[in-house]
Amino acid sequence: MSDHLIVFDTTLRDGEQSPGASMTREEKIRIAKILERMRVDIIEAGFPAASPGDFEAVRAVAETITDSTVCALARAVGSDVDRAGEAIKPAVSGRVHTFIATSPIHMRDKLRMQPDEVVEHAIKAIKRARQYSDDVEFSPEDAGRSETDFLCRVLEAAIDAGARTVNIPDTVGYNLPEEFAALIVELMERIPNSDKAVFSVHCHDDLGLAVANSLAAVRCGARQVECTINGLGERAGNASLEEIVMAVRTRQDMFSCDTRIETKYIVPASRLVSNITGFPVQPNKAIVGANAFAHEAGIHQDGVLKSRETYEIMRAEDVGWAASRIVLGKHSGRNAFRSRLAELGIQFSTEEKLNSAFARFKDLADKKHEIFDEDLQALVTEQGLEHANEHLRLVSLKVCSQTGETPNAAVVLSVNGEEKRAEASGSGPVDAVYKAIDSVVGSQSELQLYSVSAITSGTDAQGEVTVRLERAGRIVNGHGADTDIVIASAKAYVNALNKLVSPSQRTHPQSGQAI
Ligand code: KIV
Ligand code: ZN
């Protein structure tokens, strides 16, 4: 059995399926580049049949990434497989991942297919995918609730048809570690051609067991894990890449394999994904949470000062928790700015975009003298958002907040190029700003989440605001950053409203649509 554990990152596909986490082509490229630097083996870049935009994004990732395999997802249907195959064509190494549900409930109520038809669709899709790449992965969706006899049948046929990787998804996060590990062992033992394929696992976190289930399977012979940065993903999310990688690396006494991951990129990747998707990382999240290496209790601090191993099982710097470095300042020139961004994996497609980012940087450096990598990341994300959404723009904002008085806000917005003004008061300055904006836009949306955090330390740090809006079942996230948190709040709200008005015609890969 191989001692290499393949890391298959699906932040750009399953992660993107989190409500409100959709990413633009440029954002996907930025995340893909850091995953590549981290030495992720396979990057699942998206579901090309979902929309022309998704197709373009996967293709752009395939054109850019050279050191990781780029994978595209397809339902087990000819047209999906063709879109996926076309999208990964430019890749140095490309994979098509096709799937079909195999649990009784999915076959009966979602697909409305007999088991024989499911096997037939799987075989056809795999053979078709092999016309685009020798590297084909097959997943029996909802394997965790499928009958083992049927799984053996469909997986044997899939391997015969040319699948080199067979992935066992616990799609709804239902399994327990012992149960899931036993399933992997039984499948590997009973399927006659199981030695011709790599066994992979893909676990969701509905019961908080995605990482435990994945690790239990790895200990029993699975040699690919599917995971996402920060555990992003449908509902409660997917198994988190950082937790799996660090568990395997830290407990080498318990695993007969390891990944090739450069762990020092874990924290920067976590921040980038959080910054782009607007999903904050909880402070007590393992490995990447702000408190993951903070020692509060006096007794712990005493122990760590005497010998760090008393309470630390990993080194903060090994996962990228370096103290933030001041990288640029007010006097830095365009070349220094360009080269630091290049080191962060950010390149602009045109000189005009670089110039506009540089102008923003100068504005920021006037307000905040020390500019950190995190500030640069936020600046680039904001610029990308504005380019993507031209409908609504914040022109100016004036807020009056004083003890004993009701806060008041006056905003000027550009709506499709036309300037509109509004004033409102509210229980606090942010409430007043949101009411003023809403009196212009009339969004009829519900604010589900508002969160603010500091990008770096110090009172001159930029505040990063995330909002989540819901309207008629559609959820969008917006975010904004500024040294003034009320302005950051306004930017985040405008960003979310822009997403709400832009039409979304993406097909969800796992929806109940007939295939
Ligand atoms: O959770 C799941 O079953 C999936 C499949 C498409 C692999 O994401
Ligand atoms: Zn999934």
Image: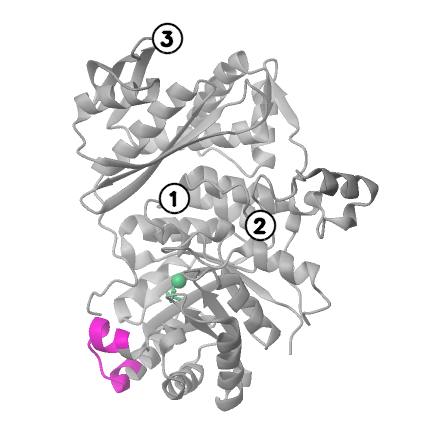
Image marks 3 and 2: residues in contact by CB distance under 8 Å: no
Q: Residues within 10 Å of mark 2 (few under 14, many from 20)?
A: some
Q: Residue at x 80, y 39 (%)?
A: 305
Does ligand 2 reach within 8 Å of label 3's beta carbon? no
9 versus 329 height, above or below: below
Please name the amino acid that badge 3 sits on.
Gln
Residue 286's disc number: 2
Residues under labels 2 and 1: Cα distance? 29 Å
Question: What range of the chain is rendered magenta?
Answer: 105-118
- Give percent across and percent down for residue 352: 42, 24
- Above or below, comparing residue 15 to residue 215 in the picture: above
Q: CA distance from mark 1 to mark 3?
A: 43 Å
Q: Nearer the viewer, mark 3 or mark 2?
A: 3
Outermost right residue:
306
Under mark 1, the amino acid is Arg
Among the two numbered marks 1 and 3 on one chain, the one whose residue lies closer to the N terminus: 1
Q: What scheme was used to colour the molecule? A: one colour
Q: Regarding ligand 1, which quadrant of the image does it lie in?
A: bottom left
Q: Is residue 492 above or below residue 218?
A: above
Q: Secondary structure at mark 2?
A: loop
Q: CA distance from mark 3 to mark 2?
A: 40 Å
Q: Which residue is mark 3?
A: 402
Sequence order check, earlier mark of 2 and 1: 1
Q: Which residue is mark 1?
A: 25
